[in-house]
């Protein structure tokens, strides 16, 4: 039999072309051999999932999907793009609110709602996808009744999520819905800036302008949803009662029979998870995202990350495009001739001067952080000893790392520090 005639089968499904691919999974078009119905099958690389300790996130996503049976949640056809007419945008927004309302009623908060996660089936109905960052109320809400994990995609994240003082998952999801409606109608983002902290400021005060082609009623509607105060933000009952929203509204009709069982979710990993984690774990540098940069900064100015006061500065940073293992090796090779003992743990190092200085032995801590797969930020900070001695040490160290350093701290000061990726 020729290779062209061989059919790849998973269970009752015949696999077709790849329609999407990510770090840990591929999504393939498939068709049921029993009914002929088209489906999308997400095939996970279990080896990578286990190595990167993603099993719990996958379990949570599957567990979330098992809780949710709704005509506007998951199956895919294409991603929204471009600007829509008001009637078309309203139809999709109505379906989005139906789906979000249902998820919230089941104690599920999506936390990463954006157009890329809103798909269309073959009949043109909206499907909410990607629950990898979702939260389940019984499991993740703390004693104060709020969620505390800062996650999402920057342009769609509610201001209270960025404040890092706890947030209500339902009102935060509704903010994202308001941003999505704006994007559908305008064709561009309401909050956007190449500088992360400027973006943060715009979101925190809801600084946006509606385009002239939007009707007055939808402008008013969006403004009530994009209220930076979660306490006065429009709620789902208020949305359902709004005159603009109610035009041609069709309430969802679906079967919500609860037959949730998580046995298969746990079984898929239990046979080899312990072995993979203990025997095949490959440590990676801690991945940074824009939220990490916000938390590292003081106030709303990322420039504070790179304080140029040489008298009091106790730490410095540089970026490198070299592999993290090479960065660690080069720092070790440069530090030892300067009289430093090197202690390593994964991608963190402690450099200890064997000779005592004015304030005892100078100890320097370094850590390699991943900003992007091919870009790393290296922190070098004084852990103990004299600050002036630290400055002198760093100058000597940096002169030996010229083939490693991509941008020094001073060069980063003159250009905006940007980050496009947000995590869980």
Image: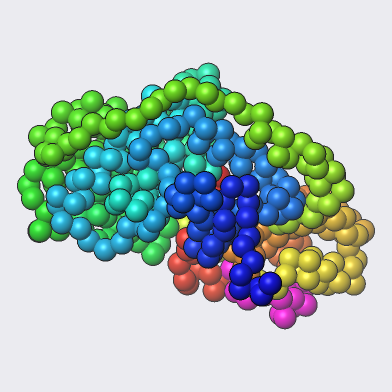
Q: Residue furthest bottom?
A: 403
Establish if 322 lies above or below 77. below
Residue 107 occupies which quadrant of the picture? top left
The secondary structure that dominates the magenta segment is loop
Q: Nearer the viewer, residue 120 or 203?
A: 120
Q: Name the residue at 79% across, 55% down.
A: 282
Q: Is residue 145 visible?
A: yes
Q: Name the residue at 72% across, 80% down.
A: 403
Residue 82 is left or right of residue 346, and the answer is: left
Q: Point out the image quarter for the C terminus.
A: top right
Residue 406 occupies which quadrant of the picture? bottom right
Residue 407 belongs to magenta span: yes
Q: Name the residue at 32% across, 47% down.
A: 126
Q: Residue furthest top?
A: 143
Q: Name the residue at 53% across, 43% down.
A: 132
The x, y position of residue 384, in whole percent, is 78, 50
Q: Residue furthest front?
A: 1
Identify the magenta region: 396-409
Residue 22 is left or right of residue 386, and the answer is: left
Residue 64 is left or right of residue 327, and the answer is: left
Residue 420 belongs to magenta span: no
The x, y position of residue 269, in whole percent, is 73, 40
Q: Is residue 150 visible?
A: no
Establish if 168 lies above or below 339. above
The x, y position of residue 112, in whole percent, is 44, 45
Residue 90 is left or right of residue 392, and the answer is: left
Q: Nearer the viewer, residue 203 or 381?
A: 203
The x, y position of residue 376, in whole percent, is 64, 65
Q: Point out the image quarter for the N terminus.
A: bottom right
Number of marks in the rendered image: 0
């Amino acid at each position: 039999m020729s290779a062209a005639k061989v059919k790849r089968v998973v269970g009752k499904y015949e696999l077709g072309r790849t329609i999407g691919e990510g770090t840990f999974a591929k999504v393939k078009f498939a068709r049921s051999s029993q009914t002929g119905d088209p489906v999308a099958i997400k095939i996970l690389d279990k080896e990578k999932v286990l190595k990167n300790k993603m099993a719990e996130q996958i379990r949570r996503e599957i567990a979330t999907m098992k809780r949710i049976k709704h005509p506007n949640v998951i199956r895919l056809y294409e991603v929204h793009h471009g600007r829509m007419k008001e009637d078309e945008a309203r139809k999709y927004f109505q379906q989005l609110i139906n789906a979000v309302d249902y998820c919230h009623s089941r104690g599920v908060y999506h936390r990463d709602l954006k157009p890329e996660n809103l798909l269309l089936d073959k009949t043109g109905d909206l499907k909410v996808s990607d629950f990898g960052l979702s939260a389940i109320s019984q499991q993740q809400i703390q004693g104060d009744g709020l969620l505390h994990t800062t996650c999402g995609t920057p342009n769609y994240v509610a201001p209270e999520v960025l404040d890092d003082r706890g947030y209500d998952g339902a009102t935060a999801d509704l903010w994202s819905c308001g941003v999505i409606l704006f994007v559908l109608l305008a064709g561009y983002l309401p909050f956007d800036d190449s500088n992360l902290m400027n973006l943060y400021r715009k979101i925190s005060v809801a600084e946006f302008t509606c385009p002239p082609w939007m009707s007055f009623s939808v402008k008013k509607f969006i403004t009530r949803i994009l209220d930076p105060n979660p306490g006065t933000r429009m709620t789902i009952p208020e949305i359902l009662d709004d005159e603009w929203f109610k035009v041609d509204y069709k309430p969802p009709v679906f079967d919500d029979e609860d037959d949730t069982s998580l046995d298969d979710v746990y079984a898929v990993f239990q046979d080899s998870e312990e072995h993979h984690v203990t025997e095949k774990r490959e440590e990676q540098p801690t991945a940074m995202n824009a939220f990490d940069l916000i938390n590292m900064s003081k106030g709303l100015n990322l420039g504070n990350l790179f304080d140029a006061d040489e008298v009091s500065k106790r730490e410095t940073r540089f970026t490198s495009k070299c592999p993290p293992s090479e960065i660690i090796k080069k720092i070790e090779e440069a530090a030892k001739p300067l009289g430093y003992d090197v202690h390593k743990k994964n991608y963190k190092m402690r450099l200890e001067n064997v000779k005592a200085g004015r304030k005892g032995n100078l100890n320097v801590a370094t850590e390699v952080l991943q900003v992007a797969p091919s870009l790393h930020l290296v922190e070098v900070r004084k852990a103990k000893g004299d600050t002036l001695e630290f400055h002198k040490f760093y100058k000597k160290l940096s002169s030996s790392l010229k083939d490693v350093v991509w941008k020094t701290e001073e060069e980063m000061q003159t250009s905006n520090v940007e980050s496009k990726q947000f995590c869980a």
